[in-house]
Image (cartoon, rainbow, N blue to C red):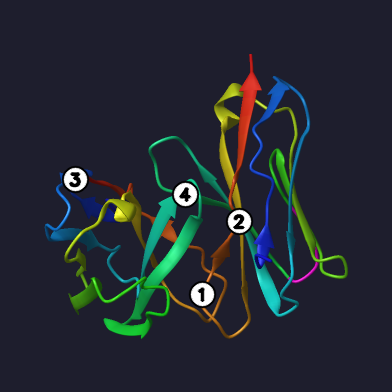
Amino acid sequence: QKEVEQDPGPLSVPEGAIVSLNCTYSNSAFQYFMWYRQYSRKGPELLMYTYSSGNKEDGRFTAQVDKSSKYISLFIRDSQPSDSATYLCAMRRTGGFKTIFGAGTRLFVKA
Amino acid sequence: DAGVIQSPRHEVTEMGQEVTLRCKPISGHDYLFWYRQTMMRGLELLIYFNNNVPIDDSGMPEDRFSAKMPNASFSTLKIQPSEPRDSAVYFCASSPGADRNYGYTFGSGTRLTVV
């Protein structure tokens, strides 16, 4: 079993839809949770991060962490064609600096 | 700041040849990471450095792979001899520190094809 599981998709939605992206994990020591966005032929870029449980909002993006269920989510409101990319969840434990990435979910937002 | 700079962007080589990938991290970032990305395995951490010292190389697949960081502004990942299964996109990333949750800044990657 992988430490981090993420559905690779693809996920296709119409412009303006609310998008929900999710990851599950098995290591209860993970405390830092991140979402990266990767456009085609580019490196991943950090989008959001949260520490431990709770929500964090940044513009159209909301990250949620439920440590009791070992489940994290990224919500995108009012999705735009420019949001079309691969979204990777990532996480690491306190005291460590080794970040484990999910497989990434490919998202297509149709105009 | 120019970000993390990797070279070359693309590399095509024949099986058995030596390949050297290069990375210049962001100035002031103490941590440097080498990742490999494939469709099958996603992003895999190969090795990372702190202040030019290798900290964890447990992800290096085998002895054919080696990495160095001779100074704070330069790192190399070498594959010798290369094999077709090494074909992947290799990313270098840097980060300012571990005392807070700094994310990584990735380069644009080197797309390696071994034929």
Furthest-left residue in this view = B17
Give the magenta-colored segment's residue range: A52-56
Q: Chain of mark 4?
A: A
Crowdedness near tag 4: few (<14), some (14–19) or many (≥20) residues, C-alpha within 10 Å? many
Q: Residues within 10 Å of mark 3 (few under 14, many from 20)?
A: some
Q: Nearer the viewer, residue B13 or B3?
A: B13
- Dot 1 or dot 4: first in sequence order is 4
Amino acid type shown at disc 3? Glu
Q: Position of residue A95 (x, y in %)?
A: 58, 86
Secondary element type, mark 3: strand
Q: CA distance from mark 2 to mark 3?
A: 26 Å
Q: Which residue is mark 1?
A: A98
- Tell me the amino acid under the disc marked 1: Lys
Q: CA distance from mark 3 to mark 4?
A: 20 Å
For disc 3, the chain is: B
Where is the C terminus of chain B found, in terms of image quarters?
Answer: top left
User: Residue B2 in magenta?
Assistant: no
Identify the secondary structure beneath mark 1: loop
Residue annotated with mark 4: A44
Do the residues at pointers 1 and 4 share their chain?
yes
- The CA span between labels 1 and 4 is 16 Å
CB under 8 Å between discs 1 and 4: no
Q: Left or right: A88 with respect to B108?
A: right
Distance from disc 1 to disc 3, alpha carbons, whole Å, reads 27 Å
- N-term mark: 4 or 2: 4
- Quarter of the rendering containing residue B92: bottom left
- Please give the name of the residue rendered at 68% of the width and 25% of the height, measured from the top-left corner: A12
Indicate the amino acid at tag 2. Answer: Gly
Residue B11's disc is 3
Pointer 1 chain: A
